[in-house]
Amino acid sequence: MSIPNVDAGSEPGPIVEDDTNAYAEGRLFSFEIFWRDHYAWLEERGYLLRERYTLGWTAPWKDDLRKLIHSESSAIPPAAGLNDATRISDGSYVILKRADRLDGSTLKTGVFREIYMCQKFSSEPLASHPKNHCIRYIEVLRVPDAEDDLIVLPLLFPWELFPHSTIGEAIDFFSQVFEGLQFMHNNKIWHGDCKFNSIMMDASPVLKDDPHPWKCHRTRDFTREIRPLRSRTLNPVRYYWIDFDLSGEYDPSTGPPAHRPGYGGTRDVPEWAYPDRPCNPFAVDVYCLGNMIRGYFTEGSAHSPPNKVMGLEFMYALVADMTLEDPAKRPTMDEVVDRFSSIKAGLSEWKLRSRFTPRQELSVRETIHLTRHWAQQLYFMARRIPAIPSPR
């Protein structure tokens, strides 16, 4: 897990010092003090934080601010409750996330926090289910002097770290994301915050170098830019749902699903115009996922690539229905998956291998890119490499 919601994780406590000049003065931000103070304890538990959090750390740019932008230790987590670490036993990279400590009172609320959901999706019979696209936790560390705990999660990266190359690669993304949310709903669990950065990917199949967890376009040592060396068509990736701090579990014995709005990252959900009116959280999930696809694929938005992608007209009707104002008229995730399967079955191989690109004028440069694209696709066809990647 990496680069999750900026509001993810528990609050670290009150601000203890003015952070305005923290970078210029070469010191930690106040929300990082927790990590510095627990460096030795985490090392004892088998996890090593970056050098920035060692006692006595000195910023390399303290006497020359020009060094800041090129310094690895200038990178900080996007949220107070997150940090990255190296697992000492095998050298693997992980994410540490502060989360509400699980207790009986938490369970009684009907809205479960991160730890409960991670444990549920990482335990059998759900853990090995082929449709489970929820992030699996490694372990939970009980912090001895805090009211919350630390979930240890695998390091993942944003699904949009690099653009898809073909329509078929986008189809694989839709398939995994739809299937993962359907799996949650079929197990009577709603996600509660279905937005673009609640979906991550294991980028290792397409990368040679390890990206920095908080500056993903730089290598971990900050020496160069990260570039994908392999295509997703040839080296399929797996996508995961993350961030379950707004998730909940539905009990059918209580009647139809109804829950007061949880107010995740999507702000234009029609039901949220009535904050005191319980709504169907499963229908909200459908809306938010459809809205994300609309913003990042079929239409574009101010927070995503400004131009809609060429060739995705086949998704328009489904996305429109997923984002209907009346929640009762939206399809369920079972219906979304069924309709999408029919859509996918009707796409030709040439369509699937078409270039995934925003709509733009065909310049000389674009003609060269298009020629290279189809040369690669013809090579894949000759090798009988499927147009739709399959990470399973």
Image (cartoon, grey):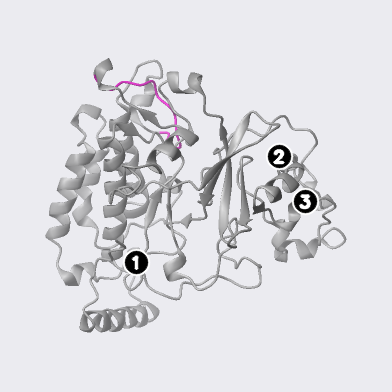
For the residues labelled 1 and 2, the Cα–Cα distance comes to 37 Å
Element carrying mark 3: helix
Element carrying mark 1: loop
* Location of residue 202 in the rendering, given as x and y in whole percent from the top left corner: 44, 59
**Relative horizontal placement of residue 249, taking residue 88 as reference (left or right):** left
For the residues labelled 1 and 3, the Cα–Cα distance comes to 39 Å
- Number of callouts in the render? 3
First in sequence: mark 1 vs mark 3: 3
Q: Residue at x 63, y 33 (%)?
A: 11
First in sequence: mark 2 vs mark 3: 3
Magenta segment, which residues? 256-267
Q: Which residue is mark 3?
A: 23
Q: Find residue 236 and name its label.
A: 1
Element carrying mark 2: helix
Q: Is residue 143 above or below residue 41?
A: above
* Location of residue 27 in the rendering, given as x and y in whole percent from the top left corner: 81, 49
Q: Amino acid at mark 2?
A: Phe
**Relative horizontal placement of residue 25, taking residue 267 as reference (left or right):** right
Q: Is residue 131 above or below residue 344?
A: above
Q: Which residue is mark 2?
A: 31
Residue 184: quadrant of the picture: top left
* Location of residue 142 in the rendering, given as x and y in whole percent from the top left corner: 61, 36
Front position in the image: 293 or 386: 386
Mark closer to the observer (1, 3): 1
Q: Amino acid at mark 1?
A: Pro
